[in-house]
Image (cartoon, helix red, strand yellow):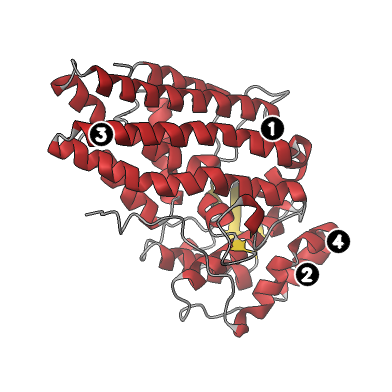
Amino acid sequence: MFTTNTANLLRRPTVSLPSGFNALSDTAKNLPSLIHSGASVLRHEVRKIPLLATKNLSGGEVRLAILYYHILQSAYVHVEEGESVIPKNIAIPAYRLSVKLSGGDHSSPSIIRYFSYVNDNWKEKYPDAPFSLENIEPLATFTGTKSEKMFILTHLTPFEHLGADGKQVILRMCEAVKTHQNTLLIKSLETLTLFLREMQIGFSQIEKYVSPDVYRNTIRRYLMSLNNVVYDGVEEYGGIPQSFTGASGMQTTTIPNFSLALGIRYKNEKIREPIAKIKQYLHPRDQVFMCFVEDSPNVWEYIKKYHRNNLNLIRAYNDCLKALEDFRVSHGKFIASYITPSKPDEHGTGNTVIPWWLNAIIEEIKTYYL
């Protein structure tokens, strides 16, 4: 059972590995220079990393090592077309760490994922200063560009930061429905509305700091899927090429959690299917929380059944739903600028046909107004 203590705020990442992992850390941190030097140089330097034992890594060390291994895997394959084999010195440890993080699930995807690239990829410049865009910086990037650094950081704040705070609000909403505390439910809905409005404004931060051309032409290629790639030395794969979905905003739990908390359950199978598939790409703790919210009493059904005459409650719910709808509309405009300016049927890094998928979601959201 979740409580306000177990619904963790944004976790502060581990920022260093034991000294035996210096070659891994140094290569990952030097990735922009290696990419700039060309595919042959990059791949040569990656192959020089020793095959390291990872069984003694624990906690945040596991997540940091996963970030470094997976960012190197992606760069190794995507820096230049034609490479379809990940060398065993980074394939084996990355696979083992992914399985370890998942609690032993051998189907855990061994690829760079959103929670690694964003949530586990930052440190504070001044630990005693407030958490803010000015006081954080990424641990590793592909390109070293200001656009990529700010692409990561502007996803952390406000989106992931408010998503972490939103978990506690969602818990209060669940409790309010169970105990019929409508005043608490109204207050919680109003707080989520404020969060969604602030997150909508967050798109302007990305537009201010991140060049669409840099994102489309450099950053995005390293976040794309791995298709028919051999993980050399990973016995569990048996030499069979593997395909995994790339790091995508679909893999954030923030908006899905807010949607579930509002009682939204998508009916369109073409919406539900990608959401179901993406769950295995989430951090295990995020998977558990999402399932908890999904299985909790449905707010929308609760209001419809018991409180259709409570105008204040209905107004609070509809305002929150409108904020969610507006966020999705803003997201669509952002995508039109950053991903699909000339190809309206473009697939995202998460493999969905983005404009259609978002438009379908918006249409279903509209059916939930009370």
Give the structural element (helix, strand or loop) at label 1: helix
Cβ–Cβ below 8 Å for labels 4 and 3? no
Q: Quadrant of the N terminus?
A: bottom left
Task: Pinpoint residue 282: horizontal percent, then vertical percent.
Answer: 44, 51
Task: Kindly identify which residue carries mark 2.
Answer: 44
Between disc 4 and disc 3, whose residue precedes?
A: 4
In primary-sequence order, the first of circles 2 and 1 is 2
Q: Position of residue 275 (x, y in %)?
A: 42, 37
Nearer to the camera, 179 or 69: 179
Q: Is the residue marked by circle 2 packed among few (<14), some (14-19), or many (20+) residues within 10 Å?
A: few
Query: Quarter-wise, where is residue 350 in the image?
Result: top right
Q: Residues within 10 Å of mark 1 (few under 14, many from 20)?
A: some
The residue to which callout 1 is attached is 338
- Identify which amino acid the numbered label 4 is placed on: Ser
What residue appears at the point 46 percent right and 55 percent down from the top-left corner? 10
| Residue 185, label in figure | 3
Mark 4–mark 1 distance (CA, rounded to whole Å): 27 Å
Q: Quadrant of the C terminus?
A: top left
Left or right? Give the position of 298 relative to 351: left
| Residue denoted by label 4 | 37
Q: Earlier in the sequence, mark 4 or mark 1?
A: 4
Element assignment for label 3:
helix
How far is disc 1 from disc 3 in space, using C-alphas? 37 Å
